[in-house]
Amino acid sequence: DPVKGVSLAEKVFGAVETVEGVAQRLNAKIMGSVQPMAEKAAVSAQNERRAKELRETLAQQQKRLQALQEPFKGL
């Protein structure tokens, strides 16, 4: 049971984990499950920023194109 601190060493040898050992083991498990989510969140945030930049660029280019086409309307 990971919460109670029953490790393989305790099961096999009857050894008792230290508080530091339990903390390290639990931190490793937590980091193992949290790290992939954090990496995905970072990539998602980066993609969102890039999409916003691309939308802004598109809007600017559309305005510029309209300004360039204006003199040719009605020809």
Image (spheres, rainbow, N blue to C red):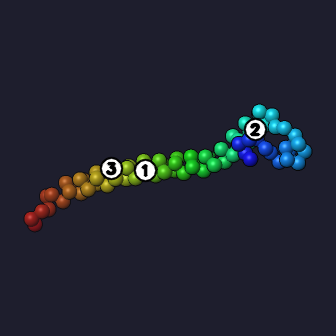
Residue drawn 52% across and 47% down?
42
Q: Is residue 74 left or right of residue 56?
A: left
**Pointer 1: what residue?**
48
Residue 64, position as x, y percentages in the image? 24, 53
Q: Is residue 40 left or right of residue 53?
A: right
User: In the image, what residue type sits under mark 1?
Assistant: Glu
- Mark 2: secondary structure: helix
Q: Which mark is residue 56?
A: 3
The foreground one among 15 and 71 is 15
Question: Which of the image's four quarters has the C terminus?
Answer: bottom left
**Which mark is nearer the camera, 3 or 1?**
1
Q: Relative to 60, is 16 above or below?
A: above
Residue drawn 43% across and 50% down?
48
**Which mark is nearer the camera, 1 or 2?**
2
**Comes first in the chain, label 2 or label 3:** 2
**Comes first in the chain, label 3 or label 1:** 1
**Pointer 2: what residue?**
22
**Comes first in the chain, label 1 or label 2:** 2
Residue drawn 71% across and 42% down?
3
User: In the image, what residue type sits under mark 3?
Assistant: Glu
User: In the image, what residue type sits under mark 2?
Assistant: Val
The foreground one among 43 and 19 is 19
Residue at the outermost right position: 13
